[in-house]
Image: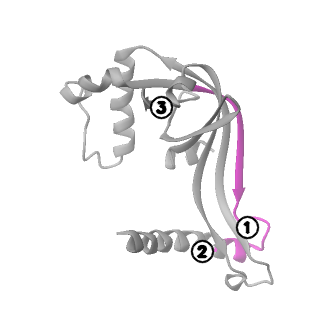
Amino acid sequence: MIEVIKTYPLATVISIDNNEPLITHLPLIYSNGKLIGHIDINNPHAQLLQNNTEVTLIFSGPECYISPSIFSSTQLPTWNYIKVHLKGKAQENLDKMALKQSLISMTKFLEAPDHKYILSTDNPRLDKYLDYILMFEIEITHWEGKFKLSQDKEPNDIIAAREELIRANQESVIQFLNKVF
């Protein structure tokens, strides 16, 4: 589950405010058993990420439809996916130096492995925006992994489903981007 979070760090963050769900998508970095994130202070979700607020998080890995045509044995159509559901408590971190270092660390993590861009501590734009960014940490209280990968099939069919998951994800990204760009 940690590898899913590290590989696909964009989380769906869900909180409840006045019986209404509030949903935001944010990259979160797993560090020392916690998740660390940043949000624009003008985002309505920012207030809910300050004071030990309960949050639900969803991290999504690859997913796709699996046709029975790829299997060597008789099967029905299915959908394979990787999801991680977490619950936790969010708490604001008011330390501006910690915020600055966290933004630098997150950039370094997200730029890996090539590190084509390095956010430096003396970047004037970084200092200019620190007052408009809320840093928060989420203490994870519950973990649940949802890995449906045709693991109940015969070994050859498991391999075929894995290959289809890779192929379908690469192809769907290309097809989607060709339609919208």
Q: Is residue 141 magenta?
A: yes
Q: Which residue is mark 2?
A: 164
Give the residue at x 52% y 68%.
169
Q: Indicate left or right for 80 with 177 as reference.
A: right
Say how the picture is coloured. one colour
Between residues 101 and 53, which one lies in front from this camera angle? 53
User: Residue 132, position in %: x, y?
Assistant: 35, 24
Q: Quadrant of the N terminus?
A: top right
Q: How far apart are labels 2 and 1 at the CA level?
A: 11 Å
Looking at the rendering, the stretch of residues picked out in magenta corresponds to 138-159
Give the residue at x 40% y 14%.
95
Mark 1 packing: few (<14 Cα in 10 Å), some, or many (20+)?
some
Q: Which mark is residue 37?
A: 3
The quadrant in which residue 75 appears is: bottom right
Q: Which residue is mark 1?
A: 150
Please name which of the two marks, 3 or 1, marks the residue nearer to the observer.
3
SS at badge 3: strand
Q: Which mark is residue 21?
A: none
Residue 92 higher or lower than 148, as above or below = above
